[in-house]
Amino acid sequence: MNNRDKKRYSFEEYIGKKASWMQKWRKKGILWETVIVVGAIGWMVALPMVIGGYVGSYIDRNMQVSTGGVSWTVTFILLGLFIALYSVWRVFIYKR
């Protein structure tokens, strides 16, 4: 085996070691994928509820609607919660 073949072999060994290292870390990447999915679900739930809270608060402050004591803030927060749960179900559970 000449010097050139030895260098080629050591280069192939080096690449093989790096590839196995990357495959090992990709398998461990499941944790980060889970963190990303949980973060996406968090935003999908929090955003509609916060928007509903702001809309309901705006209606409660600025509109003089005789509703018999119904809080529009709570109503729109609950509506935002139902929209959020439906969107999470459609994206992560239903998956056509």
Image (cartoon, rainbow, N blue to C red):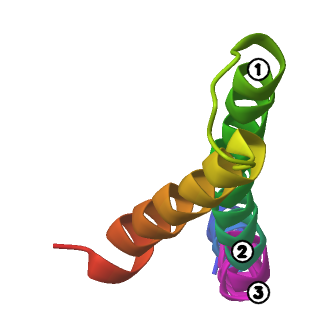
Q: Is residue 32 magenta?
A: yes
Q: Position of residue 88 (x, y in %)?
A: 48, 67
**What is the three-letter code of the residue carrying label 2?**
Met
Callout count:
3
Residue 58, compared with residue 12, is above or below; it is above
Q: Main secondary structure of the magenta part?
A: helix
Q: Which mark is residue 24?
A: none
Q: CA distance from mark 2 to mark 3?
A: 10 Å
Crowd rating for badge 3 (residues with CA inside 10 Å; few <14, some 14–19, many 20+): few
Bounds of the magenta segment: 15-33
* Residue type marked 1: Tyr
Residue 17: quarter of image: bottom right
x 28%, y 79%: residue: 94
Say if 24 sits above or below 68 in the image: below
Across and down, in percent, residue 51 comes to 69, 34
Q: Which residue is mark 1?
A: 58
Residue 41 location, x and y as percent?
A: 64, 65
Residue shown at 76%/20% (left/top)? 58
Q: Which of disc 3 and disc 2 is earlier in sequence? A: 2
Q: Looking at the image, is 85 positioned above or below residue 62?
A: below
